Image: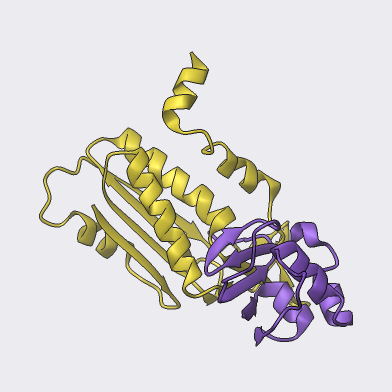
Chain colours: A yellow, B purple
Amino acid sequence: MTTTIRLQREAFDIADEVAKLTIGRTDIGAVVTFTGVCRADENGKPIAALILEHYPGMAEAEIARHVEEAHARWPLFGVTVIHRHGRLTPGEVIVLVLTASSHREAAFAAAAFLMDYLKTRAPFWKRVETADGTAWVDAKAADDAAAERWATPPERRREAAK
Amino acid sequence: MKLLYFAWVRERIGKAEEQVDPPAGVDTVGELVAWLARRDEQYAYAFANPKVIRAAIDRSHVRADAKIAGASEIAFFPPMTGG
C-alpha cells in the first residue's frame, strides 16, 4: 500500500495528490477524496481565521497508526493524509484524506473512519480568531460519537446487525 | 522526565515544556496530574478538571491509570479538535 502522511503549513494541490496516488496503476477502481475546509463561521459567529496547533511527532505517529488500522480493515491500495497547521483563513483547505481501493465501498468507509479518528485522536487543537481576539474550539460530543461507531470491528458489526 | 503541554493547558501553565523529577509515590499519570496541580495557581488552573485532560506517554495516548515509570516524554492536552 502507498501511504503518504504530511503535516505542513503550506497549501497543496488536491488533483496533484490524487495523481500521485494513482499514477501508473490500473488496479485502483475508486478514489475517495475528503477535503476539510475552513468556514467563515464557528457556532454561528463570524471568524477571521483558524489557528491550528499540533504535537509534532505524535501527530504523524497517531495518523500512521490509524492508517495501518484502516489498511487492516479494508482492502486499500493507497492512503494519503495531509493536515495543515498554523493560521488558515476561510476557504482554505485544512485537511485532505484520500483512500484508494478496487471498489468504492472500502474507499468510502476507510475515508470516513480516518476522518472520524483524525477529529478525536490526532493531536491537533483549533483556535478561532475573531474581532474580539482568539478562543479555543471546544471538542464536540458528536465527533466522539462518530469515532465510537468504529470501535466494533466491521465483521462483528455485521453479525450484530443480523 | 520531560513534560509537554499543548493548547490551553500550555497557556494556563505558561510554558510549553519542562523537566520534572516527581517524588516517590507519584506512579501514574493521574497521580502526576494531582502532584502538578499542587505546585501553584497556574498548574491548579490548568488541571482544575482532570477529567478533560488527555495524556500521552512517548507519543501514544494513555489513560490516567497508566504507569509513568520509564517514560521519557509525557504530554498533557485538552480534547483534540483537529480535522
- Pinpoint residue B72: horizontal percent, then vertical percent: 55, 76
Q: Is residue A148 left or right of residue A16?
A: right
Q: Report the front residue among B19 and B69.
A: B69
Counting from the top left corner in percent of width and height, residue A70 is at 38, 45
Asked if residue A105 can be seen in this view, the reply is yes
**Relative to residue B58, is residue B69 drawn left or right?**
right
Taking depth in this image into account, of B30 and A3 the one nearest to the observer is B30
User: How many numbered marks, from 0 up?
Assistant: 0
Residue farthest front in this picture: B24
Residue nearest the viewer, comparing A66 with A124: A66
Report the residue at 75% width, 62% height from top: B30
Residue B5: name its quadrant.
bottom right
- Is A8 rendered above or below residue A35? below
Q: Does the rendering let one see residue A52?
A: no
**Residue lying at the far right of the rendered structure:** B41
B44 sits left or right of B33 in the view: right
